[in-house]
Amino acid sequence: MLLRYSAVLTLAASLAAAPALAQSSTRVFTNARILSIAGAPLDRGTLVVRDGKIVSVGPGGSVQVPRGAETHDLSGKVVMPGLVDTHSHIGGVAGGDGSAPLQPDVRVLDSLDVRSTGLRRAQAGGITTVNVMPGSGHLLSGQTLYLKLRGGTTVDDFLITLSDGRIAGGLKMANGTNSIRSSGGGPFPGTRAKSAALAREQFVKALEYRDRIRKAGDDAEKRPARDLGMESLVEVLDGTRTVHFHTHRHDDILTVLRLAREFSFTPVLQHVTEGWKVADEIARSGAGSSIIVIDSPGGKLEAVDLTMRTGAVLEKAGALVAFHTDDWITDSRLFLRAAALAVRGGMSREKALEAVTINGARLLKLDDRIGSLAPGKDADFVVLSGDPLSVYTRVEQTWVEGRKVFDLSDPKDRLYAVGGYGATRGETMHAHEEE
């Protein structure tokens, strides 16, 4: 339920322990136009942050400023939640190899280079949480990884740990032309029908694996041999791991929804280029859509009907919509353009801003922690020079869990924001068909 600002929002309970990289001091950000996404915009609002969490947010003059807090006057600036990118390939990741079309045991965790400058570009674009995925050249190319762009030198510094101790991430699947090999006859499918059949076969195996484990109970001798791939698919069947399904054409989208109904999981539909053709079906399914919004379509025939109207059509149908970069398809530094282009295509301003913040958090099942500025949530936010939908607006600062990870006024950070020698060092272009 949306929070109202008739009274100051404060955090009554003590805050949970902050991550090791979060700042321990109290900071107060004043006089900004705050787009909390949790409620109406605030002119000359105040945001209080302590130990990596939001303590309070409210109208200027109504929020109690803690004694001794470090104060930042943001007059003339706009503050909004950190952006959530639900589909990216930063970090030079790779997924499955050519040995099989479905490889659920493969993990992005084991192939991510967090020192790649792609992560710095994402910070420069105001992105604070990102779903890093392998490519779509397989029916199932591996386990995705949800990252907090806190900064650090190892992948462990960026991980999001769930309440049950698991590392946050999903599973990347695909259909359509990317995962089809024209010859067929080998392990990879030669048709759309065969693609669906192979995916269905893998889920049936996972059901049988889960049943054997349940029937064995505590009897170790009756339990099947451990199967890492089946374990990740069982998590999908149990609803604890989300399938991010690359799909473009309207018939491919409906195939995904058919598989999801058959095996009782709710996918995130990635790309859904022709989602506007089957918007009502998507809305009825309950599946969320992670779409890309670009002004210069091309690249493959199945994306020929891409339109900036997709977000608006899905919004009207009542479907949950978030945006993604598919970086490099959209450079992470230009992510806010997706919201602006979607509004040009007919989407409401409110839903377009939700699509780069809270809706992405919902698709990643992290909306209790990120995606809006509300007491108790992680202090992930962006300081902008102006309106987020203006082409003239720049990301000036990016904060993750109360720690500033990007500052446009710092020459080292500015390099990643504007380009130049060294700005793309160590990066690998993403090729869907080859991964």
Image (tube, helix red, strand yellow):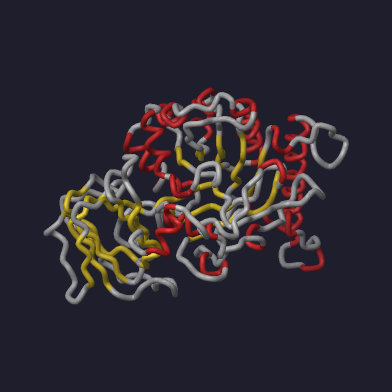
Q: Residue at image x 58%, y 51%?
A: 89
Residue furthest out toward the left? 61
Instruction: Say which quarter of the image contains residue 417.
Output: bottom left
Q: Residue at image x 24%, y 52%?
A: 77
Residue 1 location in percent, x, y? 31, 46
Q: Residue at image x 73%, y 34%?
A: 196
Residue 97 location in percent, x, y? 76, 51
- Of residues 372 and 87, the one nearer the viewer is 87
Residue 347 location in percent, x, y? 37, 31
245 lies left or right of 54: right
122 lies left or right of 353: right
Vertical placement of 231 versus 432: above or below? Answer: below
Vertical placement of 101 versus 95: above or below? Answer: above
How many labels were placed on the picture? 0
Q: Residue at image x 64%, y 55%?
A: 93
237 lies left or right of 409: right
- Of residues 291 and 12, the one nearer the viewer is 291
130 lies left or right of 409: right
Residue furthest out toward the right? 185
- Of residues 248 and 161, the one nearer the viewer is 248
Instruction: Say which quarter of the image contains residue 9.
Output: bottom left
Residue 357 location in percent, x, y? 40, 48
